Image (cartoon, helix red, strand yellow):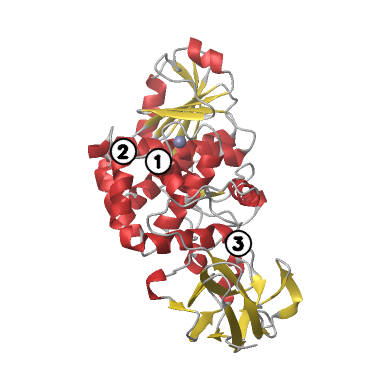
Amino acid sequence: MRIQDASAFFLASRAHSSLLCIFAFLTAGSNSLVHAQSPVVIVERLENGLSQVSSQHLKLVTDLPVTPEIADLCKMFDQAMLQWGEEFQVPRNAWIDGQANACLIVDRQRFAELQYITPDVPPFREGYQLQDRLFMLEQPSAYYRRHLLLHEGTHWFLWRFLGGNGPPWFSEGMCEMMATHQWSEQSGSLNMNWIPTDRESAPMWGRFKMIRDAMASGTAPSLERILQYSDTAHRTDEPYAWSWAAMIFFSRNSRYRDVLYENFLPNLRSHVGSEHKLTLDFKDRLDKQWPSIQAEWTAYVNDLDYGFSPEHSLPAIDLNVLKPSSVQNEVAIESNRGWQSSGIRLEQGDRVSITASGRVVVREASPHPWESEPQGISIQYYQGFPLGKLIAVVVPIDAPEQESSNTVRLVPFAIGKKHEWTSNQSGVLLLKINEPSSQLFDNAGEFTVLVAPVTSR
Ligand SMILES: [Zn+2]
């Protein structure tokens, strides 16, 4: 261990406290995760009996024993500053002197008596940010403890360096998106804005389960309702999950990201007190695409699961170019993408036939890649269908003036090489090959699909 920064030692020895230790963290090699410059973390015992851990950008007071896991929170926070700066386009010189004060709390009463939780702090459920102060109740998993600090830290960064947090869906969605992370204990490196690959990688996060349960019970809100969340909506966990899902949808989509960020980030400060206006302006700018966005949202939410890849699975559906099912349409369905438009709009009672041909790679395996034709390969199944099989759904289309109802659960059905059927609902016909979003990255090739009307039987 090496003391990196003599001034850090000076600051600590000046305080009315006993210096316990200084951790100097060195970065270990290079990998894909972002490293900070060897931050120094100081651990002290305060006269009031609490412990304080501090680094360049965070001072954290706690009634917990300071284990390496707790000390790592400071190291992590310093790295988060770089990633917030990058995501929110705040230049380094604007945030370099920023430092937040956090309390990590087991005994809430004690923090109130010691005047850390002052009367201006409203009762909070798990975490709260008030100006430069962050409050967090101790969490049962190390993942969720870090998550909560990154969540409150994101609120703080937005408030401190962009002047505000925006409307509830934006604020909580952004904080949840940035806080969902990967942390390597070994190298001490942080990767924010991550989509968990499995339950074990984010214990207690549980957003996918909440979304799936709501879909199953028919209570999943429409995108409109999420964007209209009130200031008191986030008193239960579900609105956090939906705000997160909406933020991933807009910010990870190359067609909407700029509209989102141009509308919100530069205007947060000027809209303190009129935050909902930002959402109205944002929706106005997307007005022409909005029916398509609703269809994309429905397809997207139905696909959300661990390992979801926005790059491969955010759908692009243009309702303005759909043909009626009375004309035939040929489309290429790419094997490395999620739901794709067939280009056909079905009305209830329309009878169509779909024929598919071609050969795609569904897994790069040795010694031979797994290849599939439209009927799929029956050595592996996903959601009840063979891997690689061509499958379809019909996504209802809302009338433009219609306030859309809940987000519906889609029921995929098999197409294979040929399928002829009468649609029992109206909407846009979507197609894809059957494989989880997390596994699409190594696919190659496309199926050629012909959708044609069936006039006589
Ligand atoms: Zn929050």
Helix, strand or loop at label 1? It is helix
User: Would you name the residue on which mark 1 appears?
Assistant: 171
- In front: mark 2 or mark 1? 2
| Mark 2 vs mark 1, CA separation in Å | 10 Å
Disc assigned to residue 410: 3
Helix, strand or loop at label 3? It is loop
Looking at this rendering, what residue extends furthest in the right direction?
379
Considering only order in the chain, which callout, 2 or 3, is on the residue closer to the N terminus? 2
| Mark 3 vs mark 1, CA separation in Å | 29 Å
The quarter of the image that holds ligand 1 is top left
User: Would you name the residue on which mark 2 appears?
Assistant: 275
Residue 357 sits above or below residue 191 on the image: below
Q: In the visual, does 366 lie left or right of 129?
A: right
Whether pointer 2 and pointer 1 mark residues with C-beta atoms closer than 8 Å, the reply is yes
Q: Label 3 is placed on what type of residue?
A: Leu
Whether residue 358 can be seen here: yes
